[in-house]
Image: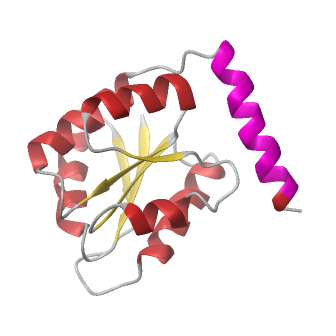
Amino acid sequence: MKIVMGADHGGYQLKNILRDHLTEQGHTVIDLGCQGERVDYPDYGQKVGETVAAGEADYGICVCGTGIGISIAVNKIPGIRAALCTNEYEAMMTRRHNDANVLVMGGRVIGEELAKDIARVFFSTEFEGGRHQKRIDKIAAIEAKYNR
């Protein structure tokens, strides 16, 4: 699986931990930065979102201090369904029901072992489709309406 990652200075340590862990698990990881310098989270959310939307990666991971700001930013990219997850259940359900393609976490609020567990569940859970596809289609219609 090819995973693209991006973080601001509040999330770069957790991003690096996840990058190394996912690489050890056999995933191909594209690290778009940052490397610890003070940066603005919208820039990295945009980079990750554009990479996933273009099909250059299967999924993305975004990390900022709380996960909130970068989540807002990456969700502005058409075709992105990013979910801020704080536990394994949220990770499982957002994949099953929302077909989320970007996982978001807060580097200052999630411990590294929990983050690894959240990522494991997110990347191993399949979208259920069925009745949930109708809802994804409605989200896409809203997106299309406002992105003319």
Residue at left offset 57%, top offset 45%: 81
**Image location of residue 58, percent across then percent down:** 51, 39
Residue 134 in magenta?
A: yes
| Prevailing secondary structure of the magenta residues | helix
Residue at left offset 79%, top offset 48%: 142
Q: Which quarter of the picture shows residue 3?
A: top left
Q: Which residues are magenta?
A: 130-145
Quadrant where the N terminus sits is top left
**Image location of residue 99, percent across then percent down:** 55, 31
97 or 47, nearer to the observer: 97
Q: Which quarter of the picture shows residue 16?
A: bottom left
Q: Which quarter of the picture shows residue 10?
A: bottom left
Q: Is 80 situated above or below 128? A: below
Task: Describe residue 85's horizontal placement relative to residue 59 as left or right.
Answer: left
**Image location of residue 21, percent across then percent down:** 18, 43
42 or 58, nearer to the observer: 42
Residue 64 in magenta?
A: no
Quadrant where the C terminus sits is bottom right
